[in-house]
Amino acid sequence: MQPKTIGKRSVDLAMTLLLLLLMARQITGETAHEWLGVGMFALWVAHHALNASWHRRLFRGRYTPFRVCQLVVNLLLLLAMVGTMVSGVVLSQTVFAFLPISGGRSWAQPLHILASFWGLVLMALHLGLHWGAILGQIRRQTDLPARPVARWVWRLLGLAVAGYGGYAFWYHQLPLYLSAQAHFVFFDAAQPAVGFFLDYLAILGLFVWLAHYGGKGLQALARRKRPPEPAPWEKKRQSR
C-alpha cells in the first residue's frame, strides 16, 4: 500500500474514533470534548488535503447517479461540519474562551446538536459510499479468501450490525436530534461506557451498510441504463 493511501486510511480511522468520542461528551467531560473537536477539525483539513485530487476532478467527467449521490452527501457533510465548528466556538468555555464572544447560546446549542448528529449520519454515509473501495484495498493487502461462504458470512454479520444499529438509533433518540426537536442530549447514566460506544459504533455501521448497498444499487441501475457496446464488426461499419 502506498504511503499516501496509508495516510488517508489512518486519518479516516482517527476521524471515526474521534467521532465516537465526541458523541460521548457526558463521558469525556466538557474540556476534553472541546479539544477533541479541535482535533477533529485538524483531521478534517488533513482529509481534504490528502484527497485534493477529488476537488480537481469535481468538474470533469460524467455525473452518474452514484457520483451525484456522493457529491450531495459531501456537500451536506461540509455544511454539518461548518455548523458544528461555528456553534462549538460560540459554546466553548475553555479552548476558545479568549475570543470576545458574548451570548449566542440560544441558537448555538440547538445548532450544535443538529449539526453534530447530522455529521455523524453523513460521515457514515460518506464512508459507506467508499466501502467497496476500502474492502478492495483490504483484500489486496491481506489476501482474504473470496469464497462464497466467506462473503455470505460477512454479509450476514453486516446485516446483524445494521439491525442492532437500527435499535440503538431509536434507543438513543437520534430521530429527535436529527429533526431539531431536542435541545439537550439524552444520556443513560446507567449504561456502561463500553455499551455506549458499541451502540454508536453500530449506528455508524447501520448507515455505512445502507450507503454501501444503496450505492451498489445506483451503480447497477446506471449499468442497466447504459446503452450496450456495439459489436466489433458494428464498430468497423460505423468507422467506414
Image (tube, rainbow, N blue to C red):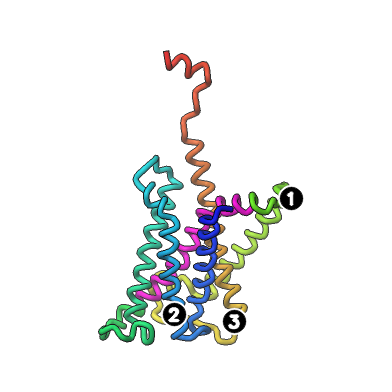
Q: Is residue 33 above or below residue 18?
A: below
The answer for how far apart the CA atoms under marks 3 and 2 are is: 20 Å
Q: How packed is label 3: few (under 14 Cα within 10 Å), some, or many (20 or more)?
A: few
Relative image position of residue 166 (x, y in whole percent): 56, 66
Quadrant where the C terminus lies? top left
Disc 3 marks which amino acid?
Answer: Ala
Q: How packed is label 2: few (under 14 Cα within 10 Å), some, or many (20 or more)?
A: some
Going from the N terminus, do you reach mark 3 or mark 2 first? 2
Disc 2 marks which amino acid?
Answer: Trp
Circle 3 — which element?
Answer: helix
Q: Is residue 42 above or below residue 213?
A: below
Residue 28 or 150: which is nearer the viewer? 28
Magenta segment includes 49: no
Q: Which residue is mark 3?
A: 193
Mark 2, mark 1: which one is toward the viewer? 2
Disc 1 marks which amino acid?
Answer: Val
Q: Which residue is mark 1?
A: 149
Q: Which residues are magenta?
A: 110-138
Q: Residue at x 35, y 68 (%)?
A: 82
Q: How packed is label 1: few (under 14 Cα within 10 Å), some, or many (20 or more)?
A: few
